[in-house]
Amino acid sequence: MDQLKQTYDAIVVGTGAGGATVAKELADRGWRVLILEWGSYRPITGTTLNALPQIALPGRDLLLTPDLYGIGRGITTGGSTIFYYATSMDPPLDMLKSYGIDVTQELKETKEELPISPLPDEWIPPISWRIMESAQELGLDWGKLGKFIYHDRLQEVERGGWGWIGAPNYEAKWNARMYIDQAIKKDAQIINRAKVTKVLIEGGRAIGVQFRRLGKKYQAYGERVILSAGGIGSAVILRASGIQEAGYDFFFDPLITAMGTVKDLKVSPMIPMSTGVLCEEEEYLLTDMYYPPLLFFLNHLAGFRIHRVLAEARTVQIMVKIKDNLGGRLTDGGGVRKTLSSQDRKKLHNGYERAKKILQRAGARDIFWGWVIAAHPGGTAKVNQLLDSNLRTRFDRLYVCDCSVIPEAWGLPPVLTLVCLGKRLAKHLSGGKLASAL
């Protein structure tokens, strides 16, 4: 087994919102940082062929539950933020504070640093305005949502490919790869196609990691190890490292999309989730939606509406995402064994019925719901169970910073929360000092 010669101040496993933030913040402080990423650093072009190996490879990027619900995750530099819809919602501050985690200052810093604001009116398409008007007439406080988008970089896109998810708006949408790029400019090192299999523990303390790359095994050593491989990946690594309790009783934010057709308005490619409403008592989020062709097809296939596949330009969509109950387990290989509770199914049904009324009022017909998808699984290594309030495991110098640390389901886009947690963890690790002073 080969060993990397250098010992690092920190090894960061994964490059999603949490890991990229920790890596960037520590590199800014002068730390010697090694970043290990299972995926590639290939350019983002926005085509389907470019996206599929990074978000839809069965068994790796695309996982299926026993009920055949799809769970997609971005295995690439930048993680799932490369393909997310750039929607920003504030962290659950009160919930986190109840576990001893206060990210109020980090939230302020992040909002000053990143482009977080609703889209300008001119980038909200007519169909979204119609959905908003319909929802408001039904008594909902439907409005524009915050987005991680640089408005001056936006470009129109044509149909096909992955549209707003990839190019030409890759540079317009903030994503975690941008933080990785900044960390590398500060002398952080990255190794791609490196799948970490376990953390090396000696005397109750993390001393490094073991990983596979191109068929060979390697070991890397560092003073700190931060797992940020996602709600599934980090739990699998923790188990292999001796924390067998990881990967149980988690959430995965199930969602469906209500779809219908309109005759009097052409639906153009749009930035998804630009408007919506959080129904807190009902525990679901409703937003406008627009899918790239492959997901559009899969939703029609699941909804037995293949005859409507060619009606994309007349199809209006509303996403229903629920706050699901904790449950299920991960297998040692990262398989997801979780089914929806009767409560969860009722939430999806109730959310669909409300979305259906909005669509009908907006003039849509032939309304149905498509494939059940689960987004951003988390809670697999919860604070107050497997981690302390500084995100440290029972092994000294081993930390976790991704969705797996969230102790309760909250059913909202997690990126802003994870950036704040990453900033907070970097402050804790550095104690305000440069690595050379440690």
Image: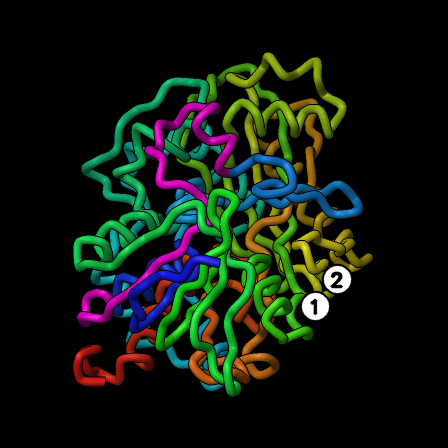
Q: Position of residue 338 (x, y in %)?
A: 75, 56
Q: Which residues are magenta?
A: 27-54
Q: Which of the 4 image quarters holds residue 19?
A: bottom left
Mark identifier at residue 337: none
- Distance, label 2 to label 1, CA atoms, is 6 Å
Q: Residues within 10 Å of mark 1 (few under 14, many from 20)?
A: many
- Name the residue beneath numbered marker 1: 248
- Numbered disc 2: secondary structure: strand
Q: Nearer the viewer, residue 36 or 302?
A: 36
Q: Are marks 2 and 1 in contact (CB under 8 Å)?
A: yes
408 lies above or below 351? below
- Name the residue beneath numbered marker 2: 328
Is residue 275 at least partly visible in the picture?
no
Coloring applied to the structure: rainbow
Which is nearer the N-term, disc 2 or disc 1?
A: 1
* Left-right relation of 30 to 193: left
